[in-house]
Image: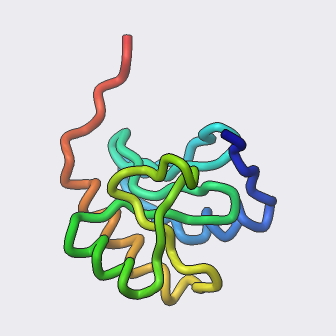
Amino acid sequence: MQIPKPTEVDKERFRVLVPDGPGIEVKPMFGNLGAFVNGNMFMGLFGAAIGVKLDEPDRHALLTDGGGPFGPEERPMTGYVTLPEGWGPADAEPWVALALQFVGALPPKKKKG
């Protein structure tokens, strides 16, 4: 499986969408980026694609609104939907907020060892 690498422009577009708040951090992941709240990923970058983790009704709504699978084509990440290509911050921010709300309600991830 080939993991696509984001450009600096892709990384900046991703970082612009990450909201500020307690417990939120951006970390590198396999040459890409992930945005985490309390240790749980709510948004990720895979090449140029930005994906958000949503509950089932919101996932369905975003898929209907032009979103698609997120992650490797042969093994997309469960629960995540890619934001439509070409969306700007005004289009993406409501979905990022829903992802943050959904994942922020999960129990904090315990650190290993």
Farthest-out residue, front: 74
Give the image location of residue 96, x and y in percent. Answer: 41, 71
Residue beneath the point at 59% across and 57% down: 45
Q: Is residue 48 left or right of residue 52?
A: right
Residue beneath the point at 67% across and 70% down: 13
Give the image location of residue 23, x and y in percent. Answer: 37, 47
For the N terminus, the image quarter is: top right
Give the image location of residue 87, x and y in percent. Answer: 58, 85
Q: Is residue 79 left or right of residue 67?
A: left
> Residue 21 is drawn in which quadrant?
bottom left
Viewer-proximal residue among 86 and 22 = 86
Farthest-out residue, right: 8
Q: Is residue 79 above or below residue 10?
A: above
Query: How many marks on residues?
Result: 0
For the C terminus, the image quarter is: top left
Residue beneath the point at 69% across and 64% down: 48
Give the image location of residue 111, x and y in percent. Answer: 36, 23
Residue beneath the point at 60% across and 70% down: 16
Q: Is residue 60 above or below residue 54?
A: below
